Each structure stands twice: as C-alpha cells, then as structure tokens.
Amino acid sequence: QNLTISTISTVIKKTSNMTNPQIERVLESADNLMANNPVIFQYEKLSELEKKSGFNKVYFIGAFAVVILSAVFLVGGAKLVTDLISFLYPAYASLKALDTDGEAVRDPQWTTYWIVFTFISIIEPVLSWIVPFYYVIKVAFFGWMCHPKFQGASFIHIHAIDPLVMRHLKSSAKEE
C-alpha cells in the first residue's frame, strides 16, 4: 500500500485531537506569546495558514526554528550552535541586569557566567578533543549555569571562585 501525502495528513489530523493537557498548555502559552508580538511572528498570516492546513500555528513556528537551527548546524557545526545557545539568552539577561535605573548593583550571577564562558572558550579546543559528547555536555552545563531556577554561575562563584580566587585577590590588594 502506498501512503500518500493526503493519507499522512489525515492520520496526523486525527491524532492531533488526542493531546496531552500539558502540551495543550504549552501550545496555548506559545500562541499567547505570538499573539502579543504579531509583527515578529506574522500572526495573521500564521492564522490563515492554520485555517487552511488544520495544524496549530505553533507547529509552523517550531518547524521554522528546526529548519533555521539545522541550517546553522550545517554552516557552522555543533560549535556554532552551542556557542549561540550559550551566548544569546545570557547576553540578553546581562543587558537586563545592567538596566538598573542608575543604581549600582553587584550581580555575581552574570559576571561569573561570563568569566566561566570565557575560560571554557579558551580551553575548548582541548576539551572538545578529550571529552566525549562535549557539545551536548557544554549546552547542559551552560543551561544549568544561566537557568534562573538553578543559577549555577552563582553556585560556582560561591563554591569555587570565592574560596579559590578571591582570597588571593584580597591578599594582594592588602599588600599594595
């Protein structure tokens, strides 16, 4: 039996009604995000495409993201993809942290993140050669460091940088 595109489309449409409530919440949340930014996401055009195809507009955005990430991967490889993942959100969060209405705020989270990011970038040629699945581990590590729930960079600051590095900086400052 030959499967045609219309048969596959029919199967997908029938099974698309059987979704998990958590998936429905994620789709609704993503749809609200797109509705709040209609120019960026071309919301009206996606709504028309949703009506014509019967597929949720969030799926089209997801497919577009997969195509873009695949193109980036083909152009620059795993290193470029992991560098972008490790850079984009932390850069955005760092800029938001700087926007403090003129108040001086000490934020070890992002300072430590960028110190570790730079250190890892310097030793990356060796690490990527020695450590198996290095790029997967790198994304997981930087995700842990920058995720607001875990704040791994602050953890590294408290447990590694403060006891190992800062005491030497403080003692050298006293000598001067």
Image (spheres, grey):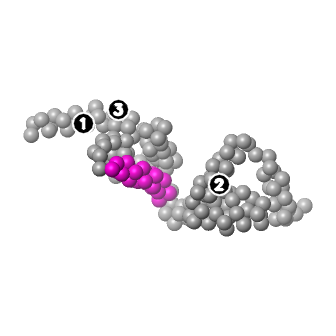
| Amino acid at the residue labelled 3 | His
Q: Which residue is mark 1?
A: 166
Residue 37 x, y percent position in the rendering = 57, 60
Above or below for 68 versus 31: below
Residue numbers of the magenta segment? 79-101
Residue in the picture at 14% in, 38% down: 173
Whichever of callouts 2 and 3 sits on the residue coming sooner in the sequence is 2
Mark 1: which amino acid? Met
- Specify the amino acid type for callout 2: Asp
Q: CA distance from mark 2 to mark 3?
A: 41 Å
What is the crowding at mark 2: few (fewer than 14 residues within 10 Å), some, or many (at least 20)?
Answer: some
Horizontally, residue 83 falls left or right of residue 17, namely left
Q: Which SS class for mark 2?
A: helix
User: Circle 2 is placed at which residue position?
Assistant: 31
Residue 160 appears in the picture as rendered: yes
Residue 93 magenta? yes
- 62 sits left or right of 86 in the view: right
User: Which residue is located at x 73 percent, y 62 percent?
Assistant: 50
Q: Is residue 162 magenta?
A: no
Q: Is residue 10 left or right of residue 140?
A: right
Q: Specify which label sits upstream in the sequence, 1 or 3.
A: 3
Which is closer to the viewer, label 2 or label 1?
A: 2
Q: Residue furthest left?
A: 176
Residue nearer the viewer, 4 or 23: 23
Query: Distance of mark 1 from mark 3, alpha carbons?
Result: 11 Å
Query: Which dot marks residue 159?
Result: 3
Give the residue drawn at x 49%, y 48%: 139
Q: Earlier in the sequence, mark 2 or mark 1?
A: 2
